Image: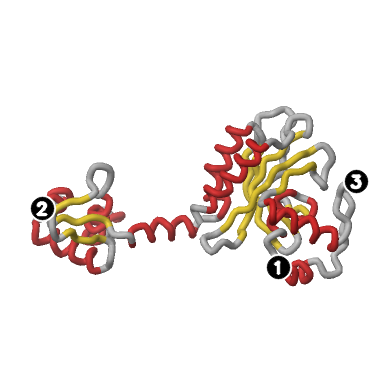
């Protein structure tokens, strides 16, 4: 036995191999088929299958005398996805959105009054929007920050922005909490933010919220680019919203 296999549990490995054996074209297997698949006797296979059945990972069809995966197996996948950072979960979808839209894509989370950028998929455009991962920007002045703030309660907004100094970055930057609340009401009703940046002149962005399974907003995703290239259309808005939805479904 090699050093790497010294503490290996063969029983556990065989149980895992049984679960892995179910797949395309093998939705159900009899006990003898399972025994053959993992190269053990039928009596040994019975012990493994019985344990998996008792623990809710397999279910038996009495009519066909075959076994199939039970819904509890899906919980393992959900647990893995939930263990990942939002940036890891969103990465594949963000890159796909970049490729389809042609614009840079960012993912952010909300921390108090700041939008914290946790993932970036850069466009190859010469006029690229490039905000590095780790950047912390005032949420009230960014598209993603706005759509995340839009899902906070009035009381929570008051708590976070008590005594807050609204800095004016552009001519269109929001200047007061009252003004911000009015904008957030419209953002929440609309379900997205599509506008020229209130933080930097010349940039336009479209942002949509990312929800968890309890329908709480946990982040946001956007596409952004120079105003000469990105003029929000219904198709682009739907691209961003659909991407956010796909990421939300993985939470």
Q: CA distance from mark 2 to mark 3?
A: 74 Å
**Labels 1 & 3 near each other (Cβ < 8 A):** no
Badge 3 crowding class, 10 Å Cα cut-off, few under 14, some 14 to 19, many 20 or more, is: few
Q: Is residue 2 above or below residue 9?
A: above
Which numbered disc covers residue 171? 3
Q: Which residue is mark 1?
A: 153
**Residue 213 coordinates in the image, percent (x, y):** 51, 60
Q: Quadrant of residue 145?
A: bottom right
Q: Is residue 3 left or right of residue 106?
A: left
Q: Nearer the viewer, mark 2 or mark 3?
A: 3
**Labels 2 & 3 near each other (Cβ < 8 A):** no
Tell me the SS state at disc 1: loop
Badge 2 crowding class, 10 Å Cα cut-off, few under 14, some 14 to 19, many 20 or more, is: some
Instruction: In this rendered view, identify the residue nearer to me: 179 or 211.
Output: 179
Q: Is residue 249 above or below residue 242?
A: below
Residue in view at x 78 percent, y 38 percent: 203
Which numbered disc covers residue 32? 2
Q: CA distance from mark 2 to mark 1?
A: 58 Å
**Residue 6 coordinates in the image, percent (x, y):** 27, 59
Q: Nearer the viewer, mark 1 or mark 3?
A: 1
Q: Earlier in the sequence, mark 2 or mark 1?
A: 2
Instruction: In this rendered view, identify the residue nearer to me: 93 or 185.
Output: 185
Q: Earlier in the sequence, mark 2 or mark 3?
A: 2
**Residue 158 coordinates in the image, percent (x, y):** 79, 69
Residue in view at x 24 percent, y 53 percent: 17
Q: Looking at the image, which residue sits at the far top?
A: 126
Q: Is residue 78 left or right of residue 200?
A: left
Residue in view at x 65 percent, y 41 percent: 237
Q: Is residue 120 left or right of residue 13?
A: right
């Amino acid at each position: 036995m090699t050093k790497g296999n010294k503490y290996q549990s063969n029983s556990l490995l065989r149980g895992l191999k049984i679960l892995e054996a179910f797949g395309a074209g093998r939705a159900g297997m009899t006990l003898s088929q399972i025994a053959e698949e993992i190269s053990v006797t039928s009596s040994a296979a019975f012990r493994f299958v019985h344990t998996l059945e008792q623990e809710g990972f397999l279910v038996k069809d009495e009519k066909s005398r075959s076994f199939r995966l039970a819904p509890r197996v899906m919980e393992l996948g959900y647990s893995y996805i939930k263990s990942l950072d939002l940036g890891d979960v969103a990465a594949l979808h963000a890159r796909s959105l970049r490729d389809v839209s042609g614009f840079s894509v960012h993912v952010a989370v909300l921390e108090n009054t700041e939008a914290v950028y946790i993932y970036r998929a850069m466009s190859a455009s010469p006029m690229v929007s490039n905000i590095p991962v780790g950047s912390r920007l005032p949420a009230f002045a960014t598209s993603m920050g706005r759509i995340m703030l839009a899902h906070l309660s009035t009381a929570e907004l008051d708590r976070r922005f008590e005594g807050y100094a609204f800095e004016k970055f552009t001519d269109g930057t929001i200047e007061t909490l009252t003004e911000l609340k009015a904008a957030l009401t419209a953002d929440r009703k609309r379900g997205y933010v599509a506008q020229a940046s209130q933080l930097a002149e010349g940039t336009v962005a479209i942002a949509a919220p990312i929800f968890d399974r309890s329908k709480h907003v946990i982040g946001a995703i956007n596409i952004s680019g120079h105003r000469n290239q990105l003029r929000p259309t219904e198709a682009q808005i739907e691209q961003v919203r659909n991407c956010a939805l796909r990421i939300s479904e993985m939470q």
